[in-house]
Image (tube, rainbow, N blue to C red):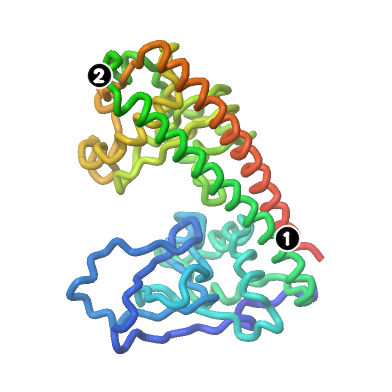
Amino acid sequence: MKSNYRALSELIEKVDERNDDGAITELIGVSIDKCFIKSVANTNGTDLSKYKIIRKNEFAVSLMQVSRDSKIPVARLEDYEVAIMSPAYPIFRVKDTRKILPEYLDMWFKRPEFDREAAFIAVGGVRGSMPWEEFVKMKLPVPTIEKQLEIVNSYKAITERIALKQKINDNLEAQAEAIYNEMIANNSTNGTMSTLGEISTIKTGKLNSEAAVINGIYPFFTCSQETYRTNTFSFDQEAVLLAGNNASAIYPLKIYCGKFDVYQRTYVISSNNRFVSNKQLYFVLKQQLNEFKGISSGTTTKFLTMKILTPIPVVIAPEDIATSFINITNKIFETIFQNQREIEHLRELQMIVLGELSRD
C-alpha cells in the first residue's frame, strides 16, 4: 500500500442532525448516478422532524444492494445550502479540510474503480449491502492540498465546459422546436397527415443484462467502442433514439448522428420520407412523450411497443415549407452534433483526470 493512502475513517465523520422543528422541507435523495434528486413523495401530513439534515459540502450515501448494482450512490451536496433526507441515508462530512478537500473526495467516489472495489467488498453482506464499518475501511490516496487543488481545478474546468456546451445545445434545441411549431405543428392543415409507422423505419434492440449504465450515462445515448456479445445492434447514421422501457414511464429521447450501439430496448427511428426529417420526428416524439405515460404495456416496468408508436400522427408539410424547415434545422443541429461530440470528448478527459487520483 502506498504511503499516502488513508482509510476513510481517518478523513470523514458521520453526521446525524435531525430536522427537529420540521422547518426544512426540501426533501432529496441520491440517485444511482451519484447526484441528488428532488423527492417526488407527497410529504403532506408527514412528520419531517425525523428526517436527517444535510448541509452544503456534506455527503450522503446509500449502502444498500451495492453488489447487485455494482455501484454506490454517493454524492456531495452542492446545489442547496441545506436540505433533508430519509433517515436511511448515512450522512458524513470531511473532518479536516486542511487534509482533504470535499471536492477531491467527491472525485474519488466518482471513479469506476471505487465502485468495483465496493461491489467486491459488499458481496458478503446481507443482500449485497455494505456495512458502514466496511465502507470507512476503504482507502484512497491523499496527496498534498496543493496537488488536490490542482486536480480539482482541472476537473472543474472540464465540468464547467460540459455544462456550457450543454446549455448552448439546450438553447439551440429550443430554437429549433419553436421553428417546428411555427412552420409545421401549428399549421398542420397546410399539409397531409401520416403516421410514424408509415413514414419512418423503426428498429429496436432487446434488453441486454450485460450492458449496465456506464459512468451514469445510458449507453444508448453515447458512442462506444465496446461491443457486447448479445442483443447488440450497431448503427452509423442520424437517428432518433427512444428508450422503450422505464419503470417510472419517463422515456429518455435523443437525436444522434454518428456511430452508436444499441444495448437495451431502444427504438432507433429514422425517416424514409424526403419531406419529413429526423429532426421533425424528434420534436413529434418529444411533444408526444407526456401522452405515453400510463398507456404503455407491461407491469412493473412499462414498455413502449410498436403498437403504441406506429399510430403517432405526423404532418407531412408542403414541399416548400418542408424544404425550408429542413435547411434551417439542419444548420442548427449541425452545431448541436458538433457540441455533442465535444461533450463526449470532455467526458473522456474527465475520466482521465479521475484516473490520475490513484497515481503518485
Q: Residue furthest right?
A: 360
Residue 233 appearing in the image: no
Q: Amino acid at mark 2?
A: Thr
Say above or below: 204 vs 164.
above
Q: Which residue is mark 2?
A: 189
Say above or below: 142 vs 118.
below
Question: Residue 222: x percent and y percent?
Answer: 55, 38
* x 29%, y 28%: residue: 186
Please give left or right for residue 183 compared with residue 106 in the image. Answer: left
* x 36%, y 41%: residue: 251
- In the image, 61 versus 241, the foreground residue is 241
Question: Residue 96: x percent and y percent?
Answer: 65, 85
* x 43%, y 59%: residue: 31
Cα separation, mark 1 vs mark 2, equals 53 Å
- In the image, 222 versus 32, the foreground residue is 222
Looking at the image, is mark 1 or mark 2 earlier in the sequence? 1
Q: Amino acid at mark 1?
A: Ser
Callout 2: helix, strand or loop?
Answer: helix
Q: Which residue is mark 1?
A: 154
- In the image, 123 versus 135, the foreground residue is 135
Quadrant of image for the C terminus: bottom right
Residue 360 appearing in the image: yes
Question: Residue 170: x percent and y percent?
Answer: 49, 44
* x 61%, y 55%: residue: 112
